[in-house]
Amino acid sequence: MDYRRVSGGRKYVARLAHGRDWRGQIEAFADAEDIDAAFFVGLGAVQDATLSFYDQDAQTYQSVAFEEPFEVTAAVGNISHPEDGGGSPSSDGTAAEERERFAHTHVTLTRPDGSAIGGHLEAATTFAGELYVREFETPLERAHDETTDLDLWPL
C-alpha cells in the first residue's frame, strides 16, 4: 500500500438539486469552490442511474443503464483532477481533459423490494440528495497506472 498524510481543509454539507445529474453537480460544486481534492459521502434518491463495473481482465468499463427509481443508501467518493487525456467521461459527456475536477463516485442503490445494485456511478437524475464533503489541503491529480490501466492517485 502507498499512502500520504493529508491535512484537512474546509467542510461542507450540500443538498443536491432535484432533476439534475448527481455526479455533475458534485463536479460543478468542486469547480465553483476551487476544491482540488476531497472525500464525500451521501444519501438520497435518484430517478434513474447508469452504473459501470470495471472488468479487470479486459481492463474496460461495462456500463448498464437503469430506468427506474432507487434509494441511494450509500454514495462515497473522492474529488481530484483527472489526468490530461485520461479518465472516464463526465456524466454530461465532457471528456476528462475538458473538465476541471472529477468526482469518482461509487453507489449502492436499492429497489422497493429491498434488492440492491451498486457500482461506479456514471450518471443519475437526482430526486433528492444530501452530501458531506471534506476537503484535503493537499491537491491530488490522477495519473495512469500501467498495472490496472486505471487513472489513480500517484502516492
Image: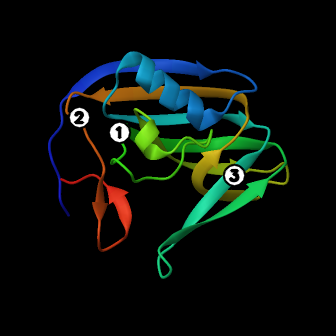
Residue 102 coordinates in the image, percent (x, y) = 44, 40
| Residue 91 higher or lower than 129, as above or below | below
Answer with mark 2 or mark 1, whichever residue precedes in sequence.
Answer: 1
Q: Which residue is mark 3?
A: 50
Q: Amino acid at mark 1?
A: Ser
Q: Is residue 112 left or right of residue 1?
A: right
Q: Residue at x 42, y 24 (%)?
A: 31
Q: Residue at x 84, y 49 (%)?
A: 67
Answer with mark 3 or mark 1, whichever residue precedes in sequence.
Answer: 3
Number of other residues with Cα within 10 Å of mark 2, as a class: few under 14, some 14 to 19, many 20 or more? some
Q: Quadrant of the N terminus?
A: bottom left
| Residue 73 higher or lower than 87, as above or below | above
| Gap between marks 3 and 2 measured at Cα | 28 Å
Residue 115 coordinates in the image, percent (x, y) = 76, 58
Answer with mark 3 or mark 2, whichever residue precedes in sequence.
Answer: 3
Circle number at residue 121 = none
Outermost left residue: 5
Q: Is residue 124 left or right of residue 34?
A: right
Disc 3 element: strand
Q: How many marks?
A: 3
Number of other residues with Cα within 10 Å of mark 1, as a class: few under 14, some 14 to 19, many 20 or more? many
Q: Which residue is mark 1?
A: 80
Disc 1 element: strand
| Residue 93 higher or lower than 101, as above or below | below
Whether the residues at callouts 2 and 1 have beta carbons within 8 Å, the answer is: yes
Number of other residues with Cα within 10 Å of mark 3, as a class: few under 14, some 14 to 19, many 20 or more? some
| Gap between marks 3 and 1 measured at Cα | 21 Å
Residue 116 coordinates in the image, percent (x, y) = 71, 57
Q: Which residue is mark 2?
A: 139
Q: Amino acid at mark 3?
A: Thr
